[in-house]
């Protein structure tokens, strides 16, 4: 891919070797989203469908060259997806007491029903990785959740 830097090619190759079968030179198509996310992109479900990702594991495989093309296309077509501050403003809508907390159940419901909806398994995975501990009222500090989700470092004050 002529439009990719050497470091980008190396990054995609590394992710491909993690998710794919290095000896066979193939990767299951259902893992393309994980590969692109590991390479700092955020493909939508529609974008992955456009690339031909199969619905079930084992139905289709991609080569490294195909993954490099998908990375290049996804990078080029990357839309403004919002930043950390935009997400904070959205979650403030659920902060009824204006104390930096929201109900974890409301967050789960939002992820399952708004925008590009996540599946129960996807929400569970995000919560395992990013959800801070709930207080006795079932609330979480959404700033901590978003920092973990967007990989922003926590400040010493937290």
Image (cartoon, grey):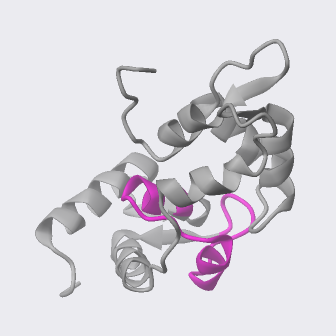
Residue 55 figure quarter: bottom right
Residue 112 image point, x, y percent? 83, 53
Q: Which residues are magenta?
A: 33-59
Position of 41 with respect to 140 (left or right) is left
Residue 68 figure quarter: bottom left
- Give whichever of 25, 5 is nearer the camera: 5
- Give whichever of 73, 91 is nearer the camera: 91
Q: Is residue 22 visible?
A: no
Residue 107 image point, x, y percent? 78, 43
Q: Quadrant of the N terminus?
A: bottom left
Residue 84 image point, x, y percent? 49, 54
Residue 55 located within the stretch drawn in magenta: yes
Residue 103 image point, x, y percent? 81, 33
Q: Residue furthest left?
A: 6
Residue 29 located within the stretch drawn in magenta: no
Position of 111 with respect to 45 (left or right) is right
Position of 87 with respect to 122 (left or right) is left
At x 67%, y 78%, the residue is 46
Position of 56 with respect to 105 (left or right) is left
- Give whichever of 18, 36 is nearer the camera: 36
- Give whichever of 97, 143 is nearer the camera: 97
At x 67%, y 56%, the residue is 90
At x 21%, y 86%, the residue is 3
Q: Residue furthest front?
A: 98
């Amino acid at each position: 891919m002529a439009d990719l830097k050497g470091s980008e090619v190396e990054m995609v190759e590394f992710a491909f070797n993690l998710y794919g079968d290095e000896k066979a030179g193939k990767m299951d198509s259902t893992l393309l989203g994980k590969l692109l996310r590991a390479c700092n992109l955020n493909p939508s479900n529609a974008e992955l469908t456009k690339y031909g990702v199969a619905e079930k594991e084992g139905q289709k495989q991609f080569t490294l060259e195909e993954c490099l093309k998908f990375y290049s296309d996804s990078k080029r077509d990357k839309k403004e997806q919002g930043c950390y501050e935009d997400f904070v403003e959205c979650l403030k809508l659920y902060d009824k007491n204006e104390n930096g907390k929201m109900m974890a159940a409301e967050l789960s419901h939002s992820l399952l029903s708004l925008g590009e909806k996540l599946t129960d398994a996807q929400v569970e995975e995000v919560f395992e990785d990013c959800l801070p501990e709930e207080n006795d009222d079932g609330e979480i500090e959404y700033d901590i959740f978003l920092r973990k989700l967007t990989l922003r470092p926590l400040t010493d004050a937290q």
